[in-house]
């Protein structure tokens, strides 16, 4: 079982930590040797694909979201993923005068990482049985992509049911 610092598993359906753990589950238990650095600053939210059955419901929920979401709590999620303060990520680029700054210090600081991720707080469907979470991945100059992932509450846990790209560099 994946442990997310500050987010104990609960029976509550609207558990942001449980949604994030479900999104990261395949990465955490997979055979990859990569290490994932995750920013504590939530990712931006984008639109949900219109062909998804609950897209209108999510869009309504998005309209009621606060302008800024609370940060994720820093800490280890699994052996391959860790949430770090955004200021630590930003510090690796701070003194580089190039435009855009280089990634050498980032890769030196976060050994084994191939970039960093940011995840939004989940947006729940009105019935609480589905959620979407948005993610951004930055991976060097001119490299990155965004995703939206939909999950369903079933059998006492969150399960990824679909995902789609939102942007690509």
Image: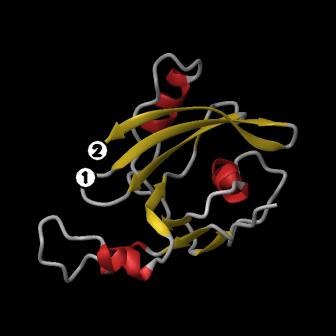
Q: Position of residue 76 (x, y in %)?
A: 64, 73
Q: Tell me if residue 40 can be seen.
A: no
Q: Pick whichever, 101 or 160, lies toward us.
A: 101
Q: Position of residue 102 (x, y in %)?
A: 23, 70
Residue drawn at the location 40% of the way across and 57% of the way down = 68
How far apart in space, not on screen, are marks 2 and 1 (Cα)? 6 Å
Q: Tell me if residue 166 can be seen.
A: yes
| Label ID, residue 163 | none
- Among all residues in the image, which is located at the extreme right? 155
Q: Pick whichever, 127 or 84, lies toward us.
A: 84
Q: Which residue matches tag 2?
A: 169
Q: With respect to residue 73, does 149 lie above or below?
A: above
Quarter the N terminus occupies: bottom right
Q: Mark 2, residues whose alpha carbon is within 10 Å: few (<14), some, or many (≥20)?
A: few
Residue drawn at the location 25% of the way across and 59% of the way down = 141
* Horizontal arrangement in the rendering, residue 19 relative to residue 66 (left or right): right
Find residue 47 and report its image quarter: top left
| Label ID, residue 142 | 1
């Amino acid at each position: 079982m994946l442990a997310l610092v500050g987010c104990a598993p609960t029976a509550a359906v609207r558990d942001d930590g449980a949604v994030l753990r479900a999104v990261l589950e395949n990465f955490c238990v997979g055979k990859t040797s990569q290490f994932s650095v995750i920013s504590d600053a939530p990712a931006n939210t984008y639109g949900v694909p219109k062909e998804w059955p609950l897209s209108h419901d999510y869009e309504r929920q998005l309209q009621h979201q606060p302008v800024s979401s609370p940060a994720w709590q820093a800490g280890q999620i699994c052996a391959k993923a860790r949430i770090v303060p955004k200021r630590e990520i930003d510090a690796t680029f701070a003194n580089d005068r190039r435009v855009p700054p280089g990634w050498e210090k980032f890769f030196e600081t976060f050994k084994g990482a191939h970039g960093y991720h940011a995840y939004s707080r989940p947006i729940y469907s009105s019935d609480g049985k589905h959620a979407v979470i948005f993610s951004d991945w930055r991976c060097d100059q001119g490299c990155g992509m965004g995703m939206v992932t939909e999950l369903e509450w079933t059998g006492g846990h969150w399960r990824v049911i679909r995902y789609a790209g939102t942007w690509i560099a």
